[in-house]
Each structure stands twice: as structure tokens, then as C-alpha cells.
């Protein structure tokens, strides 16, 4: 008999281009989150890294999209508050590194449950790609895009936003 999985440890990738005061920043985020369904059958995605974001939706995909938009709103706010690229980079890195200890503990517990349960994931998580948690590069990359030469700007640099079940 497989163990019920109430919490789902996720890893995600987001890519944004953000205009600030005199700069254009490219941000690629490799983060962690926990997803769960509440008593009203709403799905909630709680950030672990970055930890100060949560968003919900009727489906897991809607919760992810709302989470993604909340994160983008934070980046927009930071760009507006910061008068330079350096200040924006420092504020964004600090925001990303402000991991939520409670959600981090829930993520680790959820990962253990998923590993014990093997392949017995409930819908809709069976449709998500699975990524080994140890191999996922949690972190953030921030670069100044307007300084790139034309030959450095290529479609191959684009990264699709994604959400995967941590395994």
C-alpha cells in the first residue's frame, strides 16, 4: 500500500527580462517550492527558494502561473526601487536567498515521502517531468543584457519556464 502524498516537492525554472533604471537584466531562476491542495480543492504553491512567495489556483498549472506572475511582480518592484543594475542584482539575490525555513522543512519531508512512494504519484503530478533533487541547480543568474554584443544574443539562450516533481 502506497503512502498518501499531501505535499509535492517541486523544482522550477523561470526566465525573465526586466527593465530597470538604465539597465536591462536577464534573470534565470532555478528554485524550489511545495504544492498542496487545500480543503476547498484549491492548489497552492509555496516558495522555498525564493521563500517569500505563495500563489494559488484551481489547477496545479494555474497555481504555477500565478506563482510565476507573483515572482515577476517582485522583480518589477525591485527594478523600480533600485536605481542601478548593481543595486537591483544585490536586492534580487538577497530576495532569492531568503529561504523560508518552514517551507524548506516541508519540502524535505515531502521529498522523503515521494521517494518512499516510488512511482505512485497522484494525478496531476504523474504528468510532470521528474528531476532528481540533488542534480537540480538551485540558484539564480542575473546578467546585464544591454551590454551583450549582437552575436551573443541568440534564441538558444531562451529557457522555457518549467515545473517538475522533485524525486
Image: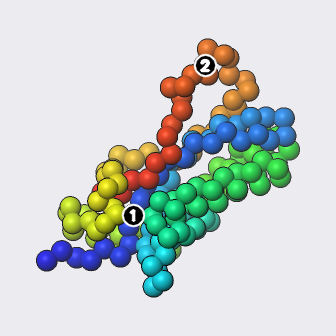
Number of other residues with Cα within 10 Å of mark 2, as a class: few under 14, some 14 to 19, many 20 or more = few
**Quarter of the image that includes the C terminus:** bottom left
Pointer 1 residue: 9
Mark 1 secondary-structure assignment: strand
Q: Residue furthest left?
A: 1
Q: Residue at x 67, y 39 (%)?
A: 17
SS at badge 2: helix
Q: Is residue 114 left or right of residue 35?
A: left
Residue located beneath label 2 in the image: 152
Q: Residue at x 27, y 77 (%)?
A: 4
Residue 110 sits in quarter: bottom left
- Label 2 and label 1: CA atoms lie apart by 35 Å
- Please tell me which residue is depicted at 63% across the width and 42% down the height of the picture: 16
- The quadrant in which the N terminus is found is bottom left
* Disc sitting over residue 167 in the figure: none
- Give whichever of discs 2 and 1 has the lower sequence position: 1
Amino acid at each position: 500500500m502506497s503512502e498518501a502524498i499531501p505535499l509535492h516537492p517541486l523544482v522550477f525554472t523561470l526566465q525573465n527580462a526586466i527593465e530597470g533604471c538604465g539597465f536591462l537584466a536577464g534573470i534565470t531562476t532555478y528554485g524550489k517550492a511545495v504544492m498542496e491542495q487545500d480543503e476547498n480543492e484549491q492548489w497552492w504553491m509555496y516558495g522555498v527558494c525564493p521563500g517569500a512567495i505563495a500563489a494559488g489556483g484551481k489547477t496545479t498549472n494555474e497555481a504555477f502561473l500565478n506563482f510565476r506572475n507573483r515572482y515577476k511582480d517582485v522583480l518589477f518592484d525591485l527594478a523600480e526601487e533600485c536605481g542601478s543594475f548593481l543595486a537591483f542584482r544585490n536586492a534580487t539575490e538577497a530576495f532569492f536567498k531568503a529561504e523560508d525555513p518552514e517551507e524548506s522543512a516541508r519540502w524535505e519531508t515531502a521529498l522523503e515521502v515521494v521517494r518512499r512512494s516510488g512511482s505512485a504519484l497522484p494525478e496531476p503530478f504523474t504528468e510532470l517531468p521528474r528531476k532528481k533533487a540533488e542534480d537540480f541547480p538551485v540558484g539564480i543568474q542575473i546578467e546585464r543584457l544591454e551590454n551583450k554584443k549582437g552575436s551573443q544574443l541568440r534564441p538558444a539562450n531562451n529557457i522555457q519556464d518549467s515545473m517538475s516533481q522533485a524525486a
